[in-house]
Image (cartoon, rainbow, N blue to C red):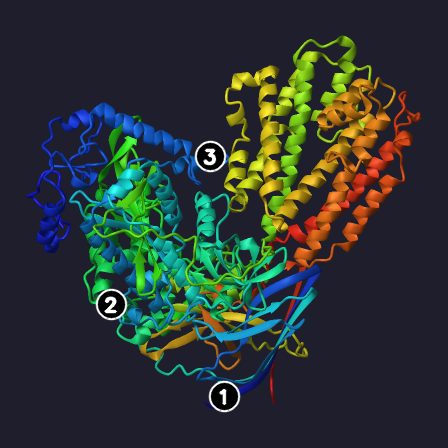
Amino acid sequence: MTDFVRYNVTHRTEYDYSSPASLCHNQMRLVPRELSYQTVEQHQVEVHPSPTIRRPRTDRFGNRTEFFSIESQHSEMLVTSHCIVRRASPSKHGAAASTFSQMRQRLRNPETIDDREAQEFCFDSKYIHADHAFAEYAIESFSPHRSMHECLLELTDRIYRDFKYVPNSTHVSTTPLQVLKQRQGVCQDFAHLQIACLRSLGLSARYVSGYLLTHPAPGQPKLVGADASHAWVSVYLGDFGWLDYDPTNNQCPTNEHITLAWGCDYADVAPISGLLIGGGITKLKVSVDVSPIQ
Amino acid sequence: MVRHPFRAAGRIVPFCPSFRTEFESATRERMPEPPQLEHPIAELFPAYRCPTTQYDELLGHGEVREHYRSLLGISPRMNGGELYLRWQSIKRSLRENPSASTGQLSRTDASRMWELDPIPFVIPELQWQQLSRGIEQRVRLLDLLLQDVYGDQRFVREGWIPPEILFGSKSFLRPMQNACLGERMLYLYAAQIVRDPAGEWVVLADRTQGPSGGGLAVENRLAISRVLERDFRAMNVMRLASFFAGLRQHLNAATEQRSKTSRNVLLSPGVASPTFFEDAYLARYLGYTLTQTSDLTVRGGDVYLKTLGGLVSVDAILRRIPDIDCDPLELNTQSPLGIAGLCQAVRDKQVRVANQLGSGWVESPALMSLLPSLCRQILNEDLILKNAPIRWCGDPETLADVMKDTERYSFRDAFTRHSSSDWHFYRSSELERNRFQEQLKAKPWSFVAVERIKPSCAPTWNANRVVAWPVALRVFAAAGKNGFDVMPGGIARVADQEEKITESLISGLMSKDVWVLTSNKVKPITLLSPSKTTTEVKRSAIDLPSRVAEHLFWLGRSTERAEGMARHARLCVSQLAGEVEPELLAFHWQVVFALSSSDGTLAEMPPPDASSHVEEMRKEVLQFLFSNHRAMSLHGALVGIKHNAEIIRDRLSVDSWQLLSKLDLNYLIPWTDRRERLGDAGVFLNQMTTLLSAFAGLVSENMTRGPGWLFLELGRRIERAYGLIRLQELLLVPGGRPISALVESLLEICDSSMTYRYRYLMNYEVAPTLDLLLFDPANPRSVTFQLVKIVEHLEALTSVSKIDVTKQRRAMMDARGLLRLYDAESLAVEVDKKDSQYPIRLHLQELLHQLVNHLNELVDFLSQRFLTHTVAARQLEDAANQ
């Protein structure tokens, strides 16, 4: 690959409790995946206060997951993930080979092991339930003999144009069906929506979490921490394999996206989830900084 | 298998043809030819009618089947009257000796649900051999399926399991992938089965989460084998005890006990569950600690039981709650209940969960429809036991077939275990049908079509007659040394209508014991003496769960409170029942007020000349006794006793339980019209006082002085101290009124009149009364006595729990010291009060208030330090992507 870029990524998550918490158990997915177009050169996750135990593992989807517990009294928790990643644009060569009807057929009557494995992402998951409303919305972009890749580019473009990006317009429990109605949301909602559309058509799609390099407005300096943790989708295209689509930015992710983890939906890849005793009211601060290394 | 056309009268047809000759020759040798029936079946069973569309368990070709002959009066021969007397008396003795599940404190639906029919369900030897082989094969198959889907998923990759059935199911728990490779997933299994019209066994449902009913089967067996002792021995019925002995042995062997103190627990959903009493029974039977999720916590990656002595590590959890509710961090992130971190502890091999988390997946009806082909593919065997006719709509051909005749089926979620949400075409409107068809078209794989099976009918004793009721059986298998052992018995459920028989254990109206006959010698086994293991001698059980300690504490308080109330109410009743002198009205009112006001304070106290009509006072007393809408009532105190006793049922002796079970208004005074008469109330209050005193006696004489006893006793002492203080404040602090009758009443309520009369004859005065009720360390009804005991108990608590209570002990000693600063004479002095026309005993009031403060502090400390461990957890705020 020629377009490798090296990034320095810092992702800070800070929880401030109004009263002390005595115990918390957490799970985090903060280490980027190793991919043919992505290499993790260095990674480190610091947790403060220091956990009693840390247990890293690889989950069912191959994501690097870690369980940790804090068992002393604490009134704040700070998780800082730091990594250096080399990222290239994934190749799209041959992505347009399969048509929509071929793809449906193969997912119904799998021909290869990959087809079978892709079937896992065809069905309902915690946040995403297929519905004919999604199929109705999406089908416009799909015709049986059109290449899947083309259909997907069009659907991605339509979602980008039909839906307004409005920060804080939704919350974690907003359903894709509500998003379809209210026509606005954030990247997580668009990803869920697009997956719901694809699964409602009998296709296989997964949810990807990661980071995105943002560019400052012309003439403005780049602000540290202004980058965001991001989400997009990945779709199974048969012999080609999987290709990513980002409905929030109307593009196929290139070397400015960094892939953290994937799963059926957000529930499988939440960067940090946890359960605590005590704590009172929680204040949450997240900052992500993605800077290219010159 | 089809019923055999040639059958000898009254003899069963061999279940499996290959056994026929062997069986027939064996029976010919052992049994005489069945006697010719002289009396028609109709005379013995006038009400027994099994529809011809259902299999008849009792009669075959108009004759009673061999295995029911001795039970139902064919040999030796009885007439209708004798048969009636036999079962009538057996039923009565069953009622008089209720089992744990039927004899609950509150006579709820749950206790009726487990009522036991005296006539057992009998299965002859050969039929059983076939059935148990089928069960064993089935659980073996399900276990392999689970090991595969949570392992390398070969069966999915081969295409044997359609992806929808695995990935479309909520009960496939991805966090458990590769969590316990190479280990078995199932330890306890149950199948709900019925016999179809052709006489073949058919499985309605598989139960692989934490199947209930096994403990009930043992309970039922104990009850039935007692009342039918002779038949039980004569018919050579296989014993059940070895089943759980095997499970326990296997679980203990599979779990390496990491330290002498670590233990195994049974995880129950709690007292609200219809099978809670079975959980308690089973926990006791297996020697496991009965716990709920709030008793367990994960620390340092290991699972612990929260006890008074601190955290005790847990080796194995026998789970009776659905796996999805076990870990709010990884399994059901929408609920804060469960044991956060359990999945990780399982992955780290810190604890063994039985059945393993994730095992619920094989309960899916959709999977069931595939078992015949999976059995051939995986085990290379034919599936022995037939499935209920369940068809998975995910297969296009099946769906087309089903849609041709929709009226025949009910439609069910392909992954749910219950039939309660079944959908029927014939019951629905046009609009509903269209909507359903749309759903079916969109996600056919998420539905199964189920055909109803007509269950067989078994002889049942109902309303003094033998009737034919539809029946389902629940049979069990447990992990053993070589694979799985099947329990030779089980539990049968019968109902008056076949619709009430479903795949659920709680369906139906009554239970039956299941008798499996054998020609082998049966060896009695009991769980009471575990083999080979050596038990370390230990004196006290510090591993008392904190939650249990809390309920013991409140049981102590509520029994003491109820006793005080009963004595007080009894006095009011005796004073008001007869003629009441008008000049005593004010005095009576004060005593009634002290009884029934919720937090009686002096301000509310009526002035001495206020008179209330006698009828009103009587009404007040009766309301106090029977109303369930008041803050302060006897009814409320009894509910408190029941609530706490039921939860810690497994910690109470049988005798204590029997006493407490009688503390029920419906038992003591069942006729509601008598509740309007004060005289009758007096009788039942006497009974109540006796029962409560007997309970206190049992506790003091029969309960080991462990931490459990300490908390029960602390509760009692603290409550009695509160009660004494409250009465003295309400009756003795207000001055300016004739004192003699009040003092006499107070002494009566406090059960101290004998001592008083012995010491002071009939001179009722305040100072000597205060001496007796406040200061006298020898009077078990004095405040000082309570304080001394509380100090002793706190000392004992330090030694068993290693938790420092020195400060609290010193505070109690201070309270005792406070009492030494006063003398009875000075406390009895009345002082004029500024804004009141009546004087009060001010020093007494001050002293009592200080004592109450000391007690409040102690109670706060106890509940914070020992009791309320069960703080709710909550989900961490979500840092959603923007």
Q: Write down the chain letter for disc 2.
A: B
On the picture, is B480 further left or further right than B694? Answer: left
**Type of residue at label 1?**
Asp
Q: Tell me whether the residue at label 3 lies in contact with that at label 2, contact meaning CB atoms closer than 8 angstroms.
A: no
Residue B638 in picture, x, y percent from top left = 59, 32
Q: Chain of mark 1?
A: A
Q: Is residue B111 visible?
A: yes
The amino acid type found where label 2 is placed reads Ile
Q: Would you identify the image quadrant in which residue B275 lies? A: top left
Read off the residue under disc 2. Answer: B378
Q: Position of residue A168 (x, y in %)?
A: 59, 60
Give the crowd class for mark 2: few <14, some 14-19, many >=20 residues within 10 Å: some
Q: Identify residue type, mark 3.
A: Thr
Number of numbered discs visible in the structure rendering: 3
Q: Quadrant of residue B499?
A: top left
Mark 1 neighbour class, 10 Å CA radius: few under 14, some 14 to 19, many 20 or more: few
Q: In the rendered structure, find residue B108 and report the number of the disc placed on it.
A: 3
Secondary structure, mark 2, is helix
Q: Is residue B437 left or right of residue B854?
A: left
Q: CA–CA distance between discs 2 and 1?
A: 50 Å
In whole angstroms, how far apart are the C-alphas of marks 3 and 1? Answer: 73 Å
Mark closer to the chain start, 3 or 2: 3
Q: Mark 1 = which residue? A: A3
Q: Nearer the viewer, mark 3 or mark 1?
A: 3
